[in-house]
Image (tube, helix red, strand yellow):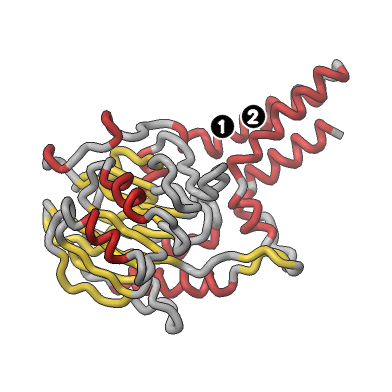
Amino acid sequence: MAAAVALLTALALAGHRHVPSLGVQLGSLWESALPWAGVVVPAVLLAAALRRAPVPACAAVVLAAVWAVVLGPVLAGGGPPPGGGAGPADGAGLTVVTHNVSAQNPDPAGTARALLAARPDLVALEEVTDAALPVYEHVLDAELPHRTRIGTVALWSRYPVTDARRLTIDPGWSRSLRAEVQAPGGPLAVFVVHLASVRLNVTGFATTHRDRNLAALGAALDEEPLRRVLLLGDLNTAAGDHALTPVTSRLSSAQDSAGGGFGFTWPAVFPLARIDHVMTRGLTATAAWTLPATSSDHLPAAARLTP
């Protein structure tokens, strides 16, 4: 039995793109949990040791090898730069941070100060309430004097922000914006987005609303005239989910490009998935990492980018 579990898990891991929906979005759920397939390995090895059975042990080795091939590259490469951020003084690139700060955040000032500890050049926030906005402005404006806010998303920048507008990927919500930042190396299109949440109910993973957002976002990226593009935000989908294809077919994930770990951001108390993303076009990610927990239920995600 243990050997069968290990081999079936290895098969599902290797062919994760082909796991069927079965009407409950099973494939999407499985791809959201891919890194956790590795926990089957020690469980099967323990069962093999207790039973002194070589077959389950061999099956566990097969699973470990498949896991390493599929997910190992994400672990290679660099985490945060020395000191937790490269800082603005070196002029070699951009340090960017995205954070769903939570509409129920009891300490927006402390959250903002924690983000500034990474010495960012750009900070994107999601779930910014009217009540908390003046607090974020008071703290962040001191270091990042250029900003724009549309609905519940906002962007702070060390460099001038121009042509900021609502990005209409969901006609009913104001949870996305597109701005142009006059960054080193030339103008940069910055998208800050917060996509619809995924709900788990009796019919499975409810993803229809989020998937419509993703399709609309992909179309908006196709229409973007600037060569350099940066997407920051809470996409409410894990990095490995094929539902993210409308975005990942157009942009590169900073976390996956830079390596250094899975970059899980949610839930903050025990992160299980990376649903907060930094994605780029025309930029190279040299480091990607998560910042320490704030008073939000998400961890902030950060990356260092070069032209």
Position in image of residue 40 (x %, y %): 71, 34
In depth, the one of 150 and 289 nearer the eye is: 150
In the image: residue 40, left or right of residue 33: right
Camera sees residue 111? yes
Position in image of residue 91 (x %, y %): 11, 42
Circle 2/circle 1 CB separation < 8 Å: yes
Q: Residue at x 69, y 63 (%)?
A: 21
Camera sees residue 279? no
**Residue 1 picture quarter:** top right
Q: Residue at x 25, y 76 (%)?
A: 165
**For residue 64, which numbered disc appears in the image?**
2
Q: What whole-number distance in Å separates the C-alpha atoms at marks 2 and 1?
A: 6 Å
Please, what secondary structure does the residue beneath circle 1 have?
helix
Task: Look at label 2 and name its amino acid.
Answer: Ala
Q: Taking 155 as reference, is 52 above or below it?
A: above
**For residue 68, which numbered disc appears in the image?**
1
Please, what secondary structure does the residue beneath circle 2 have?
helix
